[in-house]
Structure formats: C-alpha cells, structure tokens
Image (cartoon, rainbow, N blue to C red):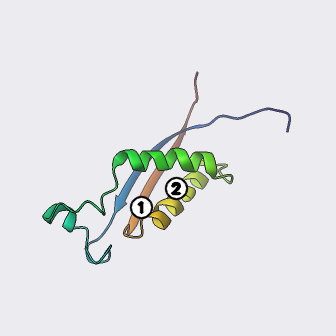
C-alpha cells in the first residue's frame, strides 16, 4: 500500500428484539427483567455502542455500509443468544475534520 488511508463515517442505528416465547437464558425469559428485576437479559445501550466500535476495528471485510451492518448483525446474534431479531441501519455520511 502507498500509505493512503480512506476514512469513512457511518451513522448507525440498532434495534434488538428478544421474544419471551422464543428466548430463554438460564431458564428465564426476557419478561423476568421487568417482573423480578433480573437484568441478565438486558444489554445496556453503551454496550451496544461499544460493539459498534469493536466491530469497526476488528472486521477486515468492511468495504460498504452493508458489509458493516452484516458484521454487526453477526456479532450481536453470536454474542447474545437470546436476541431473536437485530435491525441495523448504516448510512455513510461525509467525514469532516
């Protein structure tokens, strides 16, 4: 390589879903978060955001916003087995310094 780097900025929106009927973790469904204060199936927004940064750094096959969204989806679904759906919107925006 000639030392040239391309910098992309993405605007990322993520929605996750865990259905109590389909998802259990340690024998408990997601409704336990609301009924008994068991937060084992709650993923904080900062954790979701930190995954975005981690995947951006580690995922070598990112060439397009779609590639990035796919890498993110794989990360979330592999990490949080109780997620039943992940919706990700990635939009490339002009990068300015």
Q: Measured along the vertical axis of the image, is residue 24 above or below residue 65?
A: below
Q: Measured along the vertical axis of the image, is residue 4 above or below residue 60?
A: above
Query: At 47% from the left edge and 63% from the top edge, which residue is drawn?
Result: 79
The answer to whether residue 41 is left or right of residue 49 is left
Query: At 38% from the left edge and 66% from the top edge, which residue is drawn?
Result: 83
- Give whichever of 1, 44 is nearer the camera: 44
The answer to whether residue 39 is left or right of residue 86 is left
Q: Position of residue 23 (x, y in %)?
A: 32, 74
Residue 86: numbered disc: 1
The answer to whether residue 33 is left or right of residue 68 is left
Q: Position of residue 45 (x, y in %)?
A: 35, 47
SS category of the residue bearing label 2 = helix
C-beta proximity under 8 Å, tags 2 and 1: yes
Is the residue marked by circle 1 packed among few (<14), some (14-19), or many (20+) residues within 10 Å? some
CA distance for labels 2 and 1: 9 Å
- Give whichever of 91, 2 is nearer the camera: 2
The quadrant of the image that shows the N terminus is top right
The residue tagged 2 is 72
């Amino acid at each position: 390589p000639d030392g040239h780097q391309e910098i992309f900025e993405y605007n990322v929106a993520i929605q996750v879903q865990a259905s109590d009927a389909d998802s259990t973790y340690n024998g408990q469904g997601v409704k336990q978060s609301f009924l008994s204060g068991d937060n084992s199936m709650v993923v904080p927004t900062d954790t979701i955001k930190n995954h975005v940064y981690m995947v951006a750094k580690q995922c070598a096959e990112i060439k397009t916003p779609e590639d990035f969204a796919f890498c993110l989806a794989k990360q979330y679904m592999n990490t949080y087995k109780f997620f039943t759906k992940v919706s990700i919107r990635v939009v490339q925006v002009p990068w300015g310094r």
